[in-house]
Image: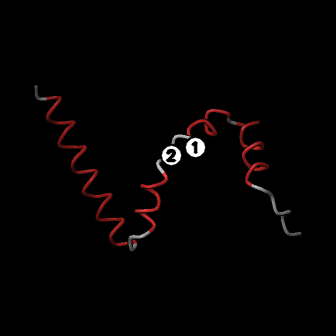
């Protein structure tokens, strides 16, 4: 299989926008500081953070349902 051509970020964004413009809009709303923070964690630390966030969201969901 021949190698894929190297694309610039703008070319990739344009190609994605043709297929799913909402995805491009959503990508503009990404919190890059949160991404940098997560990339600074080890995989195990990321898993723990995700597990803690999930637990917190579940508690909030159950609290709102039980009101």
Residue 1 to residue 49: above or below: below
Residue 48 to residue 54: above or below: below
Q: Please provide percent x and percent y for residue 3.
A: 85, 69
Whether pointer 2 and pointer 1 mark residues with C-beta atoms closer than 8 Å, the reply is: yes
Total count of labels: 2
Q: Please provide percent x and percent y for residue 43.
A: 40, 72
Location of mark 1 (residue): 27
Location of mark 2 (residue): 30
Q: Considering depth in this image, is 8 or 65 the residue closer to the camera?
A: 8
Relative placement, left or right, of 40 versus 27 is: left
Q: Quadrant of residue 16?
A: top right
Check the image and name the residue furthest to the right: 2
SS of the residue at dot 2? loop
Residue 36 to residue 55: above or below: below
Crowd rating for badge 1 (residues with CA inside 10 Å; few <14, some 14–19, many 20+)? few
Q: Considering depth in this image, is 40 or 43 the residue closer to the camera?
A: 40
SS of the residue at dot 1? helix
Q: Residue at x 46, y 58 (%)?
A: 35
Relative placement, left or right, of 1 versus 27 is: right
Q: Please provide percent x and percent y for residue 32.
A: 49, 53
Q: Quadrant of the C terminus?
A: top left
Residue 47 to residue 63: above or below: below
Crowd rating for badge 2 (residues with CA inside 10 Å; few <14, some 14–19, many 20+)? few
Check the image and name the residue furthest to the top: 67
Q: Quadrant of residue 61?
A: top left
Relative placement, left or right, of 16 versus 32 is: right
Q: Please provide percent x and percent y for residue 23.
A: 61, 38
Q: Considering depth in this image, is 64 or 28 the residue closer to the camera?
A: 28
Q: Residue at x 36, y 65 (%)?
A: 46
Q: Considering depth in this image, is 65 or 17 the residue closer to the camera?
A: 17
């Amino acid at each position: 299989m021949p190698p894929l051509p190297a694309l610039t970020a703008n070319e990739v964004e344009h190609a994605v926008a043709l297929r799913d413009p909402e995805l491009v809009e959503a990508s503009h709303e990404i919190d890059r500081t949160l991404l940098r923070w997560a990339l600074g964690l080890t995989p195990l630390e990321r898993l723990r953070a995700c597990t803690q966030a999930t637990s917190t969201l579940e508690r909030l969901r159950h609290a709102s349902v039980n009101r």
